[in-house]
Amino acid sequence: MRRISIVKVLPLVILLVGSGPLPAQQAQDWPNLQRYRQANDSLRAPAANERRVVFMGNSITDSWAKFFPQMFPGKPYIGRGISGQTTPQMLVRFRQDVIALKPAVVVILAGTNDIAGNTGPSTLEMIEDNLMSMTELARANGIRVVLSSVLPVFDYPWKRGLEPAPKIVALNAWIKSYAARVGAVYLDYHSAMADERKGLRADLTTDGVHPTEAGYRVMAPLAERAIAQALLQSAPR
């Protein structure tokens, strides 16, 4: 059956976490649009020669942003990660937190929380559809796209027993193939960070999911090379 990757607006429902409802503010702002709204409003437009890069993602990107001045000195790189987020939440805020900032490149790192079921059950095809939609939105607005592999995970500490490692490998294979098909850049963190179980190397994490500073230092040069490769491309039209 032919897949259609058109973004559809669906009614949002209040999700339950454990035995209690989400806090009222979070339930009303499911994609957390308020998180970066003020920062976005205060951000100046890119200078004529500025090659702004927005990193869109979840807690891995969110925690990385504080290291940007050290790892990417002098670079106009902006973090727009939100802890716990899944690809449908990122898709809802993609215009506000990426397109409106007018970057030359967006680096998308997403999907692990979908596999963990943070906002409910999610198939790989659902994740792929959302990644396609974000890519299409970016390219339609003249933004070059870097699609990152999902980082390796052997088990999620907050939801044991899901066996995510093979699902992540399968999703990354699709991301690599899709990036090649549409002219996006594929950024492979997984190969450099996986152990023999296809989990995150113990020297790069404390919980098996989130990188430490040592993990981010592995990721930084890989991201720099992918961004440089993207910048060599003509801007999409």
Image (cartoon, rainbow, N blue to C red):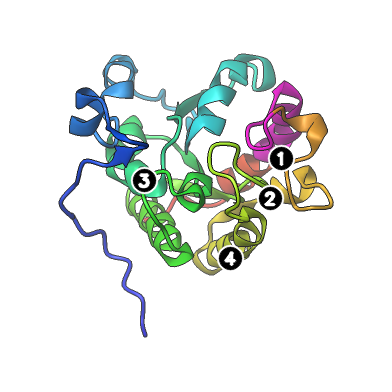
Q: In which quarter of the image is residue 94?
A: top left
Residue drawn 54% across the image and 48% down it: 146
Left or right: 127 as drawn, with respect to 186: left
Residue 119: mark: 3
Residue 188: mark: 2
Mark 3 secondary-structure assignment: loop
- Mark 3 or mark 4: name the one nearer the start of the chain: 3
- Residue 50 colored in magenta in the image: no
Over which residues does the magenta segment extend?
207-224
Instruction: Measure how far apart labels 1 and 4 are at the Cα level.
Output: 17 Å
- Mark 1 or mark 2: name the one nearer the start of the chain: 2
Q: Which amino acid does label 2 sit on?
A: Asp
Residue 234 % position (x, y): 50, 52
Labels 3, 4: front one: 3
Is 2 placed above or below 221 here? Answer: below
Mark 4 secondary-structure assignment: helix
Between 11 and 42, which is closer to the camera in this rendering? 11
- Residue under pointer 4: 180
Q: Main secondary structure of the magenta part?
A: helix
Say whether marks 4 and 2 touch (CB < 8 Å).
no
Q: Which amino acid does label 3 sit on?
A: Thr
Mark 2 secondary-structure assignment: loop
Q: How crowded is mark 1: few (under 14 residues within 10 Å), some or many (20 or more)?
A: some
